[in-house]
């Protein structure tokens, strides 16, 4: 397992480049990460990504086989987990996202925690699937947000959340 605490990360974190990719569908490749990943009280000065669009039009997604946690972290650049599948717990509790954040088509197989998060820039969560609980309690959304066409298979909590701009909850299912 990876555990990093109280660090400033000055390099791009690209989960799609850590391991070999394998074809899962026409034009779609995947990287499988088996270890749990935890960052606590870290600052990311460069992008953090688990999705890559290749020059030839193909895409690379990331499948995390264990927990993914970024607790009380600060993201100063873009964050992109588009198309990721996370088999373990998802925990971004208390994190701050200063730039564009993309969780489109995210699949969370266990509980997902985004409570007390602050999203300063646009947030995209379209077509995400939550198999277990999803918690956005006391989160703040300062720019446009889209949860369009999400499926919440269990409890969903937005208690005390604050939305300051346009928010789209159309076509959600629970």
Image (cartoon, rainbow, N blue to C red):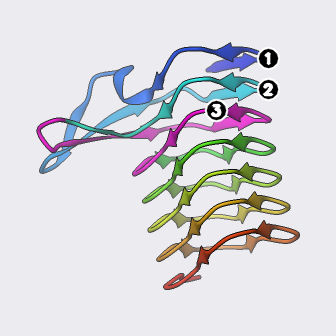
- The residue lying at 79 percent from left, 17 percent from top is 6
Label 1: which secondary element = loop
Q: Which mark is residue 41?
A: 2
Residue 137 pos. (x, y %): 82, 63
| Label 1 vs 2, first from the N-terminus | 1
Which of the two discs, 3 and 1, labels the residue nearer the N terminus?
Answer: 1
Q: Tell me whether the residue at label 1 lies in contact with that at label 2, contact meaning CB atoms closer than 8 angstroms.
A: yes
Q: Give the residue displayed 61% in from the left and 52% down from the top.
A: 121
The x and y percentages for residue 19 are: 34, 21
| Image height of 130 relative to 77, above or below | below
Quadrant for residue 41, please give it: top right
Q: Please tell me whether mark 3 sits on a helix, a strand or a loop.
A: loop
Could you say which disc has been placed on residue 6 in the image?
1
Quadrant housing the N terminus: top right
Q: Which residue is mark 3?
A: 76
Q: CA distance from mark 2 to mark 3?
A: 13 Å
The quadrant the C terminus occupies is bottom right
Q: Position of residue 114 (x, y in %)?
A: 72, 53
Give the mark, 2 or 3, whose residue is nearer the N terminus.
Answer: 2
Region of the chain picked out in magenta, as a range: 55-84
Answer whether residue 79 is magenta in the image: yes
In the foreground, 46 or 133 = 46
Q: Nearer the viewer, residue 171 or 75?
A: 75
- The mark lying in front, picked from 3 and 1, is 3
User: Who is closer to the viewer here, 98 or 149?
Assistant: 98
Cα gap from disc 3 to disc 1, whole angstroms: 15 Å
Q: CA distance from mark 1 to mark 2?
A: 5 Å
Using a 10 Å C-alpha cutoff, classify the residue at mark 2 as few (fewer than 14 neighbours), some (14 to 19) or many (20 or more). Answer: some
Q: Could you say whether the residue bearing mark 2 is in a helix, strand or loop? A: loop
């Amino acid at each position: 397992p990876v555990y990093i605490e109280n660090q400033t990360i000055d390099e791009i974190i690209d989960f799609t480049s850590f391991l070999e990719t394998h074809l899962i569908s026409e034009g779609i490749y995947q990287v499988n990460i088996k270890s749990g990943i935890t960052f606590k009280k870290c600052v990311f000065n460069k992008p953090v990504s688990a999705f890559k669009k290749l020059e030839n039009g193909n895409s690379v997604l990331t499948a995390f086989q264990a927990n993914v946690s970024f607790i009380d972290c600060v993201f100063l650049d873009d964050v992109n987990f588009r198309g990721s599948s996370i088999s373990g717990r998802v925990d971004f509790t208390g994190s701050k996202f200063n730039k564009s954040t993309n969780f489109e088509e995210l699949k969370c197989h266990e509980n997902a925690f985004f409570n007390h998060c602050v999203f300063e820039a646009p947030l995209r969560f379209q077509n995400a699937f939550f198999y277990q609980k999803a918690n956005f309690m006391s989160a703040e959304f300062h720019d446009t947000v889209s949860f369009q066409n999400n499926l919440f298979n269990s409890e969903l909590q937005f208690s005390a959340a604050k939305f300051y701009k346009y928010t789209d909850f159309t076509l959600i299912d629970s």
